[in-house]
């Protein structure tokens, strides 16, 4: 089974030695996305809701580059700087998934890249 690197200019360029996503067969594995503006490749601290929205938009761009949509997502991993932000991030997240929700875990971590507040990665099935 071969792997295909997924790259799009509509999501932030990787800030390290990794790809935005990798497709293996009909499985798509996205790298974690943080609130980096894809136009400037910069992180500007913002309210957690705004960061979560930008993260989801970045993930949407990566999914679309692979021919996927949020309906194809089977699993998400959410990393929060503070579990106190769970409800706010969940509110934003829930606007992208309306039924047949993916499996998910949400964990609090000590630190995230660029000291951001939220990072999300996904596993999807490529149609």
Image (spheres, grey):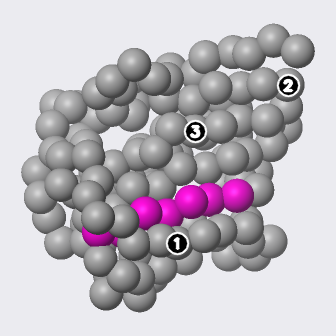
Q: Is residue 93 visible to the viewer in this orientation of the structure? A: no
**Residue 76 among magenta residues:** yes
Marks 2 and 3 sit apart, C-alpha to C-alpha, by 14 Å
Q: Residue at x 14, y 64 (%)?
A: 46
Tell me where the magenta segment starts and ends, as one range.
75-81
Residue 81 locus on image (x, y percent):
29, 68
Q: Relative to residue 21, is residue 10 drawn left or right?
A: left
Q: Earlier in the sequence, mark 2 or mark 3?
A: 2
Q: Relative to residue 17, is residue 47 drawn left or right?
A: left
Q: Is residue 2 visible to the viewer in this orientation of the structure? A: yes
Helix, strand or loop status at disc 1:
strand
Residue placed under numbered mark 1 in the picture: 106
Q: Which mark is residue 79?
A: none
Tell me: residue 41, above or below residue 32.
Answer: above
User: Cβ–Cβ below 8 Å for labels 2 and 1?
Assistant: no
Marks 2 and 1 sit apart, C-alpha to C-alpha, by 27 Å
Residue placed under numbered mark 3 in the picture: 30
Tell me: residue 29, above or below residue 82.
Answer: above
For label 3, the crowd category at 10 Å Cα-Cα, with few meaning under 14, some 14 to 19 and many 20 or more, is many
Q: Residue at x 78, y 25 (%)?
A: 24
Marks 1 and 3 sit apart, C-alpha to C-alpha, by 16 Å
For label 2, the crowd category at 10 Å Cα-Cα, with few meaning under 14, some 14 to 19 and many 20 or more, is few
Residue placed under numbered mark 2 in the picture: 25
Q: Quadrant of the C terminus?
A: top right
Q: Earlier in the sequence, mark 2 or mark 1?
A: 2
Magenta stretch: helix, strand or loop mostly: strand
Q: Relative to residue 38, is residue 27 drawn left or right?
A: right
């Amino acid at each position: 089974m071969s792997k295909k690197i997924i790259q799009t200019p509509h999501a932030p360029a990787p800030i390290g030695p990794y790809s935005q996503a990798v497709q293996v067969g009909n499985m798509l594995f996205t790298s974690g996305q943080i609130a980096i503006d894809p136009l400037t490749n910069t992180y500007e601290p913002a309210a957690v809701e705004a960061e979560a929205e930008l993260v989801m938009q970045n993930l949407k761009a990566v999914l679309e580059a692979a021919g996927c949509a949020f309906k194809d997502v089977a699993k998400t991993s959410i990393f929060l700087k503070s579990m106190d932000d769970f409800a706010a991030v969940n509110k934003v997240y829930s606007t992208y998934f309306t039924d047949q929700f993916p499996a998910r875990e949400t964990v609090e971590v000590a630190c995230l890249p660029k000291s951001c507040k939220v990072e999300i990665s996904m596993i999807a099935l490529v149609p």
